Every structure is written in structure tokens, then in C-alpha cells.
Amino acid sequence: MMRVLIAGLLLAGASTAALAADPAAGEKVFKAQCGICHSAVKGKNGIGPSLFGVIGRQAGTEPGFHFTADHKKLGVTWDTATMEKYLANPRAMVPDTSMTYAGLKDADKRADVVAYLATLH
């Protein structure tokens, strides 16, 4: 019984954190940490692919961008959970990624960035 209660509280906390994500704060983090290589503009690739519409897109498919083999065969469609996992440690998910970014370790900032990316449609 106690395990069920604790698990429920942990899940409730995770849901609360996801609900508290702030796209406006995420845009600021994106501009400071991601915008160096990535664009939020549709079709505007830079050093990295455009992240416009990335949530809901299959990994490794942004037109006009050359992805590594591991990215192309990742076989996921980016959703908030997979994007958060990737942003925490890109190389853990895609070992041959050309992205040199080590990851966004702050879970709140990561949730904010993902919330911002979800607005780009």
C-alpha cells in the first residue's frame, strides 16, 4: 500500500513539473544555448537542423539537413518525452551525433525548452 502511495506521489510530481513548463522561459534558454546552431524558423537550417515543427517529426528527416547515420536510423518521432531524454544527454541516445552539445542538465530548463519547441508549428 505504501509503495502505491509513494509511486502515485512521484507520478503526480512529474505531471506537475510538466504542467509547470514555461515556453517563454524555454525560448530564452533556446536562444542562449540552442540558437547558436539551430533555427526556430521553418526550413532555415544552420549548423544544426531547423527545429521548427520538430515535435511530431520523425528523427533525421528535416529536409536539406545532412544527418548522421545513427540519427537517420533512430526510429523515433520526436515527442516531449523523447526530446527531453535527448536534450539531457544527446550522445546517450545518438552516439554518432554531430551535435557537440553535452546536454541540458537542468530538468526545469529542459522542460521549458521542450515546451517552447512544442509551440513551433
Image (tube, grey):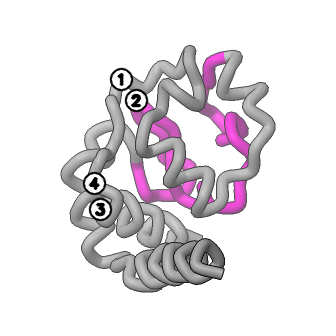
Which segment did they paint magenta?
Answer: 39-68
> Given the image, on which type of amino acid does mark 2 rest?
Ile
Q: Which mark is residue 100?
A: 1
Q: What crowding class fits label 2: few (fewer than 14 Cα within 10 Å), some (14-19), or many (20 or more)?
A: some
Report helix, strand or loop for mark 2.
loop
What residue lies at 39% left-to-right and 43% top-to-bottom?
A: 38
Q: Which label's residue is closer to the chain start, 4 or 1?
A: 1
Q: Are marks 2 and 1 in contact (CB under 8 Å)?
A: no
* 23 to 71, vertically: above or below: below
Report helix, strand or loop for mark 1.
loop
* 83 to 11, vertically: above or below: above
Q: Are marks 4 and 2 in contact (CB under 8 Å)?
A: no
Q: Which mark is residue 66?
A: none
Q: CA distance from mark 4 to mark 1?
A: 18 Å
Q: What crowding class fits label 4: few (fewer than 14 Cα within 10 Å), some (14-19), or many (20 or more)?
A: few
Q: Which label's residue is closer to the chain start, 4 or 2?
A: 2
> Given the image, on which type of amino acid does mark 4 rest?
Asp
